[in-house]
Image (tube, rainbow, N blue to C red):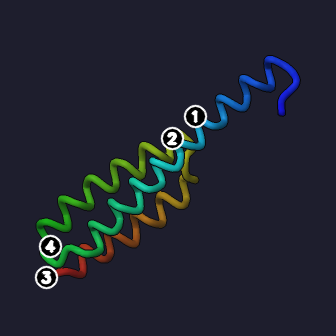
Amino acid sequence: MPQHKSAEKRVRQSARRHTRNKANLSKIKTLVKNVRTVKEKDKAAAALKIAVKTLDQLAGKGVIHKNRAANQKSKLTKLVNALK
């Protein structure tokens, strides 16, 4: 248990951040899954646009590393471009 006021505040902050980060990571997984499961190119492209925007936002905030976001965007784009 924290003994100082600042330590108590840190516990509260880290709990809030943990919840927010977990929700964001879950959101990314869902959006990537949506892109991968769609078999029609136009719908996949629309899902890709949403996923790319979210990946860029979270990489900018530091939730995920910028290279991880770039790798995921690249793989998803190649997948969508391969669809007919």
Position of residue 60 measured from the top left corner of the image (x, y, whole percent): 50, 41
Query: Label 4 crowding class (10 Å Cα cut-off): few <14, some 14-19, many 20+?
Result: some
Q: In this picture, is 75 found above or below 9?
A: below
Q: Does label 3 or label 1 sit earlier along the sequence?
A: 1
- Residue type of the residue flagged with mark 1: Arg
Using the rendered view, name the quadrant where residue 3 is placed.
top right
Tell me if 16 is positioned left or right of 71 in this view.
Answer: right
Tell me if 1 is positioned left or right of 17 in this view.
Answer: right
Query: Judging from the image, what secondary structure is the residue with disc 2 in?
Result: helix
Do labels 1 and 2 touch, CB within 8 Å?
A: yes
Residue labelled with disc 4 = 41
Query: Judging from the image, what secondary structure is the residue with disc 3 in?
Result: loop
Residue at 80% over, 26% down: 7
Q: Does label 3 or label 2 sit earlier along the sequence?
A: 2
The residue closer to the viewer here, 30 or 40, is 30
Tell me if 31 is positioned left or right of 9 in this view.
Answer: left
- Residue type of the residue flagged with mark 3: Lys
Do labels 3 and 4 touch, CB within 8 Å?
A: yes
The residue closer to the viewer here, 78 or 29, is 29
- Residue type of the residue flagged with mark 2: Arg
Query: Judging from the image, what secondary structure is the residue with disc 4 in?
Result: helix
Position of residue 14 measured from the top left corner of the image (x, y, whole percent): 66, 36
Q: Nearer the viewer, mark 4 or mark 2?
A: 2
Q: Does label 1 or label 4 sit earlier along the sequence?
A: 1
Residue 16, labelled with which disc? 1
Query: Judging from the image, what secondary structure is the residue with disc 1 in?
Result: helix
Residue labelled with disc 3 = 84
Residue at 44% over, 65% down: 72
Query: Label 1 crowding class (10 Å Cα cut-off): few <14, some 14-19, many 20+?
Result: few
